[in-house]
Image: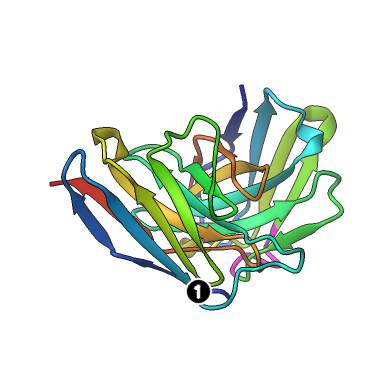
Amino acid sequence: DVVMTQSPLSLPVTLGQPASISCRSSQSLVYSDGNTFLSWFQQRPGQSPRRLIYKVSNRDSGVPDRFSGSGSGTDFTLKISRVEAEDVGVYYCMQGTHWPLTFGGGTKVEIK
Amino acid sequence: QVQLVESGGGLVKPGGSLRLSCAASGFTFSDYYMSWIRQAPGKGLEWVSYISSSSTHIDYSHSVEGRFTISRDNAKNSLYLQMNSLRAEDTAVYYCARDKDDYGDSWGQGTLVTVSS
């Protein structure tokens, strides 16, 4: 199975400051059709997960533009340009290229 | 708007069975792949199974293969997960999700399954 490794585990951030989460996969996530199926999900406390980014860098509808995704191959990053209070929660990366689909262990974003 | 409502969770003894349902609305259900994902208490996310729009393509995680069966009824806009031979480690909140533009673009609120004697 593809192992997804996120860092850091915990990310204390100051309101208004940027934040960055790294996600590395144990093998390339480039599919045979050229697409890279790497998504990012946000789970606020007590809520269901919500997808923010799909195929590395595409923002889902309604997702603020302070969220951005980048990367290629086995190395990916989620960036929040200016953290707001509503961004508190756990963030997961997920690969959809290889079955079984696998998630990273999560990064907890909290306000300092 | 897209709405996914799971039901059928509860307390079941080890070795028992349970059938989860997911009622979909706000979109053309028969056009989309659908998935089940679970989250054990205080833990991360685990993809359980997915099914193609016409049920021709199905896959399961290693941990549930042979015990769980995913199915759908496009006429009823419903997704199902039949869970047999349940184990303590199957205890989790089970979410159904729509798969649009990759996987998991919309999720339900989840239903809790507890396997305990």
Q: Which one is in front, A89 or B81? A: A89
- On the image, the x and y values in percent for residue A49 come to 46, 43
- On the image, the x and y values in percent for residue A10 come to 24, 59
- On the image, the x and y values in percent for residue B109 come to 49, 35
**Residue furthest left as drawn:** A112
Q: Identify the residue at image location x=38%, y=63%.
A: A22
Say which residue label 1 marks.
Answer: A3
Task: Specify how the rendered protein is coloured.
Answer: rainbow
**Would residue B28 be counted in the magenta stretch?**
no
Task: Report the side of A112 relative to B2 (left or right).
Answer: left
Q: Which one is in front, B110 or A87? A: A87
Q: Amino acid at mark 1?
A: Val
Q: Secondary structure at mark 1?
A: loop
**Would residue B66 be counted in the magenta stretch?**
yes
**Image quadrant where residue B74 sits:** top right
**Image quadrant where residue B6 sits:** top right
Please say if B91 is above or below A28.
Answer: above
- On the image, the x and y values in percent for residue A91 come to 38, 51
Q: Identify the residue at image location x=81%, y=35%.
A: B30
Q: Identify the residue at image location x=65%, y=58%.
A: B84
Q: Which one is in front, B19 or A88? A: A88
Task: Report the side of B69 relative to A51 (left or right).
Answer: right
Please indicate, yes or no, whether residue A82 appears anywhere in the rendered image: yes
Task: Report the side of B104 relative to B80 (left or right).
Answer: left
Please say if A112 is above or below B1.
Answer: below
Mark 1 belongs to which subunit? A
Q: Quadrant of the N terminus of chain A?
A: bottom right
Q: Main secondary structure of the magenta part?
A: loop
Q: Which residues are magenta?
A: B63-68
Task: Report the side of B82 relative to B74 (left or right).
Answer: left
Please indicate, yes or no, whether residue B115 appears anywhere in the rendered image: no
